[in-house]
């Protein structure tokens, strides 16, 4: 792994002026969730209490993206997600507000609320309809719910994915309409009957909370680098060199070029993980209750078009870090 050797990075607040122009935000304010359209570089930020906002000029100007469908806040780095294959498709798993998603980048569908709603979720991005969803209910002792109808109705599954007891080693994922995976510090378990029965398929332990689909492969982050499945989760293999990763991967032009985030910083590879370069450290944490650590509250995204890293964490503004051309 190649270390970075750059002067102190400058993270620029790109949302405080914008949020000051909006009606008063509910607690805790700030932004909570960020994703990037890897094909255009457009950045999307979840503004606590005011839904999703999009910028095509790296945070200089903003436009409302989700109408009145999305509200509340996102608590985790996986509460807002984008389909890496078709970045027009976005989902927001809101806490203390309305969650929803779009499959075309234009029309939004609200999920039926279930108590205080969600910590994070996983969408079947592998199909055009993307109607099957798994979601982890907030402070519920690990309850996981499934929807077959794009969030209109929810059914509780017989698994536990409890971040209160195992925050860094829990995961849920939809691989296709009938194939799911999950973990609760116990390797990777797989179901091929829509979550009725489960079989342990790997001892490898994910750190990321949901799998990322790109092309026809599913990726998870671990403390020893990426793991990948090309057979809908039946088998998992380590891919590339060892590096401690928790969030991502976020892809560039192809499957070889990607960025992922770990507790020691943000890393890039151009050879599918065979070698990694540390781009920068994490966004520094001011003296506030919520941390930019990527194990829960901290959220990161990468713009491969303009070579920019973005970071958010609820109660904080959203920040951008413009990387030099040599990174």
Image (cartoon, grey):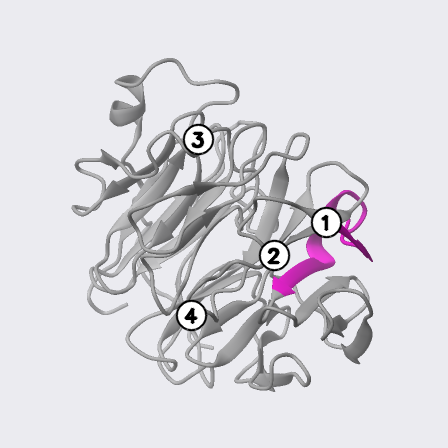
First along the sequence among labels 4 and 2: 4
Is residue 308 visible in the rendered image? The answer is yes
Q: Quadrant of residue 12?
A: top left
Calculate the distance from the C-alpha at mark 3 to the C-alpha at mark 4. 28 Å
User: Are dots 3 and 4 in contact, CB under 8 Å?
Assistant: no
- Relative to 89, is 297 above or below? above
Checking the image for residue 94, the label placed there is: none
Q: Which residue is mark 1?
A: 155
Query: Tag 3's secondary structure?
Result: loop
Tell me where residue 72 appears, x and y as whole percent.
50, 28
Instruction: Choose mark 4 or mark 2, whichever is in front.
Output: 2
Q: Would you call the spot at circle 4 few (<14 residues within 10 Å), some (14-19), or many (20 or more)?
A: few
Q: Nearer the viewer, residue 75 or 9?
A: 75
Q: Magenta segment, which residues?
A: 156-173
* Picture residue at 54% right of the left edge, 28% below the top: 97
Calculate the distance from the C-alpha at mark 4 to the C-alpha at mark 2. 45 Å
Checking the image for residue 148, the label placed there is: 2
């Amino acid at each position: 792994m190649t270390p970075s050797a750059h002067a102190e990075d400058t993270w620029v607040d790109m949302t405080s002026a914008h949020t000051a122009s909006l009606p008063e935000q509910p607690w805790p304010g700030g932004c909570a969730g960020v994703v990037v359209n890897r094909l255009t570089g457009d950045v999307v930020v979840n503004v606590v209490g005011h839904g999703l906002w999009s910028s095509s000029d790296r945070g200089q100007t903003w436009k409302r993206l989700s109408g009145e469908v999305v509200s509340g806040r996102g608590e985790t780095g996986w509460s807002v997600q984008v389909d890496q294959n078709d970045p027009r498709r976005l989902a927001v798993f809101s806490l203390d507000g309305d969650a929803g998603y779009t499959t075309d980048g234009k029309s939004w569908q609200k999920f039926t609320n279930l108590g205080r709603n969600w910590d994070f979720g996983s969408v079947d991005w592998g199909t055009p309809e993307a109607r099957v969803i798994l979601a982890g209910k907030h402070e519920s002792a690990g309850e996981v719910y499934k929807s077959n109808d794009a969030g209109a109705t929810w059914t509780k599954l017989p698994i536990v994915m409890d971040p209160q007891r195992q925050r860094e080693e829990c995961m849920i994922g939809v691989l296709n309409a009938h194939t799911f995976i999950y973990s609760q510090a116990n390797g990777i378990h797989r179901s091929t009957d829509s979550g009725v029965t489960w079989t342990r398929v790997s001892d490898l332990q994910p750190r990321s909370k949901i799998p990322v689909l790109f092309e026809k492969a599913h990726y998870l982050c671990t403390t020893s680098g990426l793991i990948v499945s090309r057979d809908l989760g039946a088998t998992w293999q380590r891919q590339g060199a060892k590096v401690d990763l928790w969030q991502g991967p976020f892809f560039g032009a192809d499957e070889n070029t990607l960025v992922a985030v770990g507790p020691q910083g943000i890393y890039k590879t151009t050879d599918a993980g065979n070698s990694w370069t540390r781009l920068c450290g994490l966004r520094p944490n001011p003296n506030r209750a919520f941390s930019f650590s990527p194990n829960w509250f901290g959220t990161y995204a990468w713009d491969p078009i303009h070579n920019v890293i973005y970071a958010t964490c609820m109660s904080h503004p959203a920040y951008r870090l413009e990387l030099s051309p040599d990174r």
